[in-house]
Image: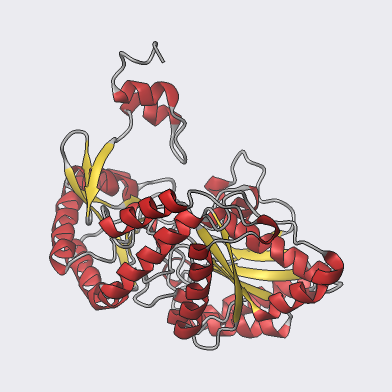
Amino acid sequence: MTELSNMSLTQMDQASLFHPVTSIHDIEVNGPQIYTSAQGVEVTRDTGQTLLDMGAGLWCVNVGYGRPELVQAGAEAMQKLSFQHFFGGASAEPTIRLADRLLGLFRDTVPGSDMARVFFGNSGSDANDTAMKLVIYYNNLRGKPAKKKIIARQGAYHGLTLASGSLTGIEGYHTAFDLPIKGVLHTSCPHHFAFAQPGESEAAFTDRLIVELEEMIAREGADTIAAFIAEPVMGTGGVLLPPEGYFARVQQVLDRHDILLIADEVITGFGRTGQWFGCGTYGLRPDIVSLAKGLTSAYFPMSASIISNRMWEVFAGASEERGAIMHGFTYSGHPVGAAVALANLDVIEREGMVENAARLAPVLLESLREATQGNPHVGDVRGVGLMAGVEFAGFRAGGTPHKIVAKHAMQHGVLTRGLPYRPVTSFSPPLCVTEAEIVEAGKRYARALAAAMPELDALR
């Protein structure tokens, strides 16, 4: 402590902090970007610069920064019951009410869903770990011990633990970690813009992907495939929207082969797509749903796994003989997190933020298309709800135009992420964003793009 006391915050950071998903060399050379405060959709750096956060943190601050309702809910819950574990049947009122509310919300907004219970964790990564474990448990109980493999997709992002990092289909997250682990398979990325053959329509592209999926199942053996995991919209992969007919066709294949569907709604849940859940947007009928991020708008680390009746009936049927399901975390169902989540859902409903996302979706796309109009380096602008991506095209292998543009965007007062799979800058502002703020962000992004042109031209 004494050695660090005379250092600046930047020096102290460089000397003591291990940053996630960050280049150590970059921190050593350039130092961190230190943020000091935030309100609404704006964040402020220690330099005094104020930026429009068009990423909602990491797709997560859905109700915006500085919401007193969430702060108050957390403070009151902490004073009343600062902690309660949920092992061995212990429980607490906020968590009970949150589970009931989530089940009702999902059933009401996702047609055809058949969900039974909610399990709570701490992050999107552990929610997908939970899904993986429960799929294994389910098939063991059914007497199908060989049915354990999980199919994910190239370009998918499902987290960074050993299991969820294996489900993630982005090579950079696997390098030097010996991932993916055994039993995880990856089928092709369903991104028509990048991976369609010349002249191939979306429908024909979907046909080809379904044939590939069927061939993978036949090759591995349907009796070895337990589940298929998918984000309704592939967020970190590049805001990749499903091609025409894709999920309906996938669902048919899964049903035919007795394969569960895990819907990773960590990003798309709670209004991001302009509906409460991406499953509703794209007609998915999941067996497990992974939720996090927008559950508390990142005011408290919390995740939820919604389990279908199909699985729950098997779990419950074996319970008397098997005893406890030996899975859970110290902080599963944390009463403070549950209270914050309930307040968060109140704000989303009271202020019509899901409807705001749907209403402003065309404004976000139009703003980005206007900002990029005529730019020779931009190949595609796409999105759904308040979730959009600008994809760059025509660069030599290894080029990072999106990261160059993201750097300039920060300098011009707007936060957008350069994503790790496709050369895409992403936009996912808080759902409380206004039309004026979106338009202003588009103008700043246009100026950033103009400033980046010499570097982009040099990458050709």
> Viewer-proximal residue, 344 or 371?
344
> Viewer-proximal residue, 244 or 397?
244
Q: Residue farthest to the top?
A: 3
Q: Is residue 149 left or right of residue 97?
A: right
Residue 101 versus residue 39 in the image, above or below? below
Count of numbered labels shown in the rendering? 0
> Viewer-proximal residue, 135 or 227?
135
Query: Residue drawn at (39%, 24%), measured in percent from left and top?
Result: 14
Q: Residue farthest to the bottom?
A: 112
Q: Is residue 257 left or right of residue 441?
A: right
Query: Residue drawn at (53%, 53%), measured in percent from left and top?
Result: 122
> Viewer-proximal residue, 259 or 103?
103
Please tell me in which quadrant of the rendered image residue 258 appears. Answer: bottom right
Residue 241 % position (x, y): 43, 72
Q: Is residue 73 left or right of residue 37?
A: right
Residue 17 % position (x, y): 43, 28
Residue 172 % position (x, y): 53, 46
Quadrant of the rendering where the N terminus is positioned: top left
Q: Residue farthest to the front?
A: 80
